[in-house]
Amino acid sequence: MDLSKLIIKNNMEGNSQKDQFAIDVLTGLCAKSKNLPAKYFYDDTGSEVFQKITKHEDYYLTTTEFKILNSIKNQLPEVIGEKEIDIIELGAGDGHKSQLIIDGFLNANCKVNFYPIDISEKAMVMLSQNMVSHPNLTVKGVVAEYFDGLRLVRNQSKNKQLVLFLGSNIGNFDRIQNQGFLRRLWMSLNASDSVLLGFDLKKDVSILTAAYNDSSGHTREFNLNILRRINAELGGNFNIDKFKHFGVYNPVLGAMESYVLSTQEQDVYVSELQRAFHFDAYEPIHLEYSFKFTHGDIEFLCQQTGFELIKQYSDKKEYFVDSLWKVVK
Ligand SMILES: C[S@@+](CC[C@H](N)C(=O)[O-])C[C@H]1O[C@@H](n2cnc3c(N)ncnc32)[C@H](O)[C@@H]1O
């Protein structure tokens, strides 16, 4: 499907996006515990490497969720009960999961208006290559941050909405932020709109650790790419060989944590920021949390944020849950 004419770009100019990146890098690298926001993983290279991660056997999340969605796709139209639906996906990625859900509604003769939202233009291009045309389907992609995109889409959308937030993206927020995110989502929706959220369940630590340290080194490449991005876009001189990827489970938080560690004492200069940053040997930069959930956590989150839990769809191994909620107002 040719989405090229259908992609709405965020109204933020290229320069102000770069300014924001610079501010976030400056803030993160000046912090006592250095950190960089995970949303900056997804430049063109990051989105391509993420594709490889999702296809890797160690990264069970994508294949497991794909199977769940495939098994429920024909049930969802009946549960939701609309003849025309606006499906909005936050962080849609390459859209191969979206296609399953869309197919379910098309199979049930529903008209579908699909609005994928993603911060990565590359992801949106990959999505356009994967989507299959259908007379009952319209697609309008938005390259923007979640809520900027949602605001743009809400101005156009007139039907009942189903918001998809898949792949356990919700796990990238901590347990306070996720409530804020979901409450903000609730505020953006109307009574009886639905959301389908992907949650990765707590499981054996060895399975989790393998998923975030895949044997082909794709996750390593993905995490180190954020330093390459600083070099390319902000004139940094990170020597990638002097940093290593470190992915570890924190059982107190119930989260995988991703870091890059400086393997020696060193200074890194970033010309756009006109300053150097000092690293001690083995000093970490925190990049990402991937929080894991129990069924109870999911029920609690749902109750706390104004939704009604309609159904939890899980796989046989209980690795992953797609949870369908309805907005109550
Ligand atoms: C982990 S991938 C998941 C992709 C897809 N939902 C899936 O389940 O396979 C996260 C996606 O969200 C996008 N993303 C990350 N942070 C974002 C943000 N703040 N606003 C919009 N999109 C974002 C990324 O570009 C990426 O495509």
Image: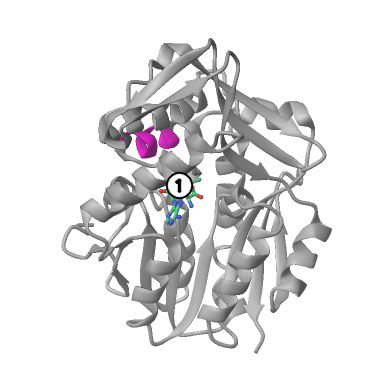
Q: Quadrant of the C terminus?
A: bottom right
Query: Which image quadrant for residue 209?
Result: top right
Question: Would you place residue 121 above or below residue 232 in this image?
Answer: below
Residue 10 seen: yes
| Dot 1 beta carbon under 8 Å from ligand 1 | yes
Q: Nearer the viewer, residue 204 or 148?
A: 148
Residue 36 seen: no
Q: Amino acid at mark 1?
A: Lys
Q: Residue at x 60, y 55 (%)?
A: 170
The residue that disc 1 covers is 39
x and y percentages locating residue 192 in the rendered image? 59, 86
x and y percentages locating residue 182 in the rendered image? 61, 68
Q: Residue at x 35, y 51 (%)?
A: 20
The verdict on residue 174 being magenta is: no
Q: Is residue 4 left or right of residue 177?
A: left
Q: Which residues are magenta?
A: 45-51
x and y percentages locating residue 270 in the rendered image? 33, 29
Neighbour tally class for label 1: few under 14, some 14-19, many 20 plus, Cα within 10 Å: some
